[in-house]
Image (spheres, rainbow, N blue to C red):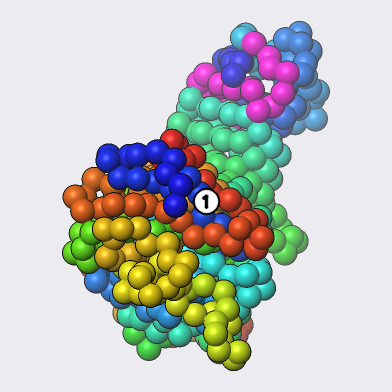
Amino acid sequence: MKKLILVPKEVTAIPVEAEVISPTVIAGRTLDEVQRLNVYQGKVKLTLADHFDVTGEVAETPAEQIIVVDGDAPHVKYMGAAMDAGRLVVKGDAGMHTGSQMAGGELTVEGSAADWAGAEMKGGVLRIDGDARHLLGAAYRGSSEGMTGGCIVVGGGVGSEAASFMRRGMIVVKGDTAPFTGVHMNGGEILVFGRAGKRLGAQAKGNGGFMACFGGVEELLPTYMYDTTYSPTFMRLYLRQLAETLNVEEALRYLDKPLKRYRGDLAVGGNAEILIAEP
Amino acid sequence: MEVSFKLNGVEIEDTFAEGFGMWGTRLIITAASRKWANTAAAEMTGFATSVIACDCEAGVEAEIPPEESLDGRPGTAVMVFGFSAKKLATALLNRLGQCVLTCPTTAVFNGLPEEMADAMIDVGKSVRFFGDGYQVKMRMGDGWEARQRFWRIPVMEGEFLVEEKVGAKKAVAGGNFLVMGETEAATLEASERAIEAIHSVPYVITPFPGGLCRSGSKVGSTYAFLRASTNTPFCPAIKHSLKDSQVPEGVNSVLEVILNGLDEPSVKKAMGVGIEAATKVEGVKWITAVNFGGKLGKYQLHLKDCVGGS
């Protein structure tokens, strides 16, 4: 793997749109070409080198490329957007739309991520060690499908409307979630180890999708119907996968925990599941 | 009999076992306890010794420790063999539905990865209908890991989890050797040791009771209505009454070890370790194998090669 290091020169008030910070875009170019890649600050067209000190090596293919953004970049939008291979590590905070529509590879944000991180994600793994703000893995306005694949792991909490219109893939939140997590969800898996916020799964249709809450739920919609309390085998598969593949070690604590199963959202004839671990 | 070589003082005939091409699959059945995993496996592999009169040949391959199973529970690996992929699928579905779905706490996972398989049998597609519309499709790893699909089927006890597809491949059946001993006790002990050794080889099963068959058969009979009958040349009780008896002097009991495997090297390896284990028991006089002159089966599993490879 070849490593390219981008050191942010300053945190600007006006955001920088830099979807070029992606192994998919950078691989196969010369270092000089990479430095001259276009970024936008408002309507002003600038180069990557105007905002970052760019050093290191460029790989032939995206799969061989690691990009390290060495510092806070909360003003930089679209990092890793649509990346399909390789690795991107942000050693600090990341701006809006980080990893949006990514299709493969691994993107790690060691700080927190702003709104729309992993929006409409199709594949790959997005790790956010801190918090993620609103609309994590969500569908863009007007779109009928949010995440259709991939996995997002958030070390902290997440804002509202996470996983809206989710179709496939998985979101794991170690902390709490704000209201409307999984709104309009139609497949996929959401596992929350903190406390899940209000209106969880509002208007979710189901299609094999579930929301598992291991730290309780603030308030459950009345349009979710209680079925049973049980320890389904399938949950063991997810919990073991989380511990073994994604290093979510707390998952193993819930291997044998009984889960209350609710089905809904009956307001839309839905068949989604909310599974709440017994305290 | 023509002696080729001796192993641990036991004479091994220079001959071959005649193996047949079949389709095989491997499943992992897990359950809340070892007891229930083994119970389901025993049910599923019952009445499956030979396709002469059973719908398939099946057996337990190994016990899977909880740390190696997908759901972290005790598991049992079973293998099922059929004459064609279609017949295998039919037998598999019947047995899954009647013997494993019904057994408390069980779940079923593919034990033959797609990269090793020649075809994937879609068991979930059929079994799911038992859920009567309440079955739930479950996907794992979509877009970030190797995708796996399962079906969750509500049952009175809770939920039955079954992987959607299981791998199947062209396999080898009919690996065999005969353990010939001075006494019934010595022959039985040697055969048991052979079976124990065989089960250390992955992807191999011994479908007969305890892995052994005391009533090996030959093609045809003196009765017109019977296609197969007792293997008279190897019956010690009539060795002096029968003109073409093949029971050597000093041999008073014969047991046949029969095994199926997912590929020829596995079967040969298993035969080799089995023969070697059997020859270590005092009282064992001869080892040979059953064949049809190479006219019926696709595989000729020479005992010399098997022992050399063990």
Name the residue carrying label 1: B16
- In the image, residue A89 sits, relative to residue B134, either above or below, namely above
Q: Which of A209/A220 is in front?
A: A209
> Which image quadrant: the C terminus of chain B?
top left
Q: Residues within 10 Å of mark 1 (few under 14, many from 20)?
A: many
Q: Secondary structure at mark 1?
A: strand
Residue A257 in view, yes or no: no
Tell me which chain the residue with mark 1 is part of.
B
Magenta stretch bounds: A57-79
> In the displayed structure, does residue B199 sit left or right of residue A172?
left
Residue A100, image quadrant: top right
Residue at left offset 61%, top offset 36%: A105
Residue at left offset 37%, top offset 88%: B156
> In the displayed structure, does residue A156 sit left or right of residue B138?
left
Q: Residue A96: image x %, image y %? A: 61, 40
Please check the rendered image and state whether residue A63 is part of the magenta-colored stretch, yes or no.
Answer: yes
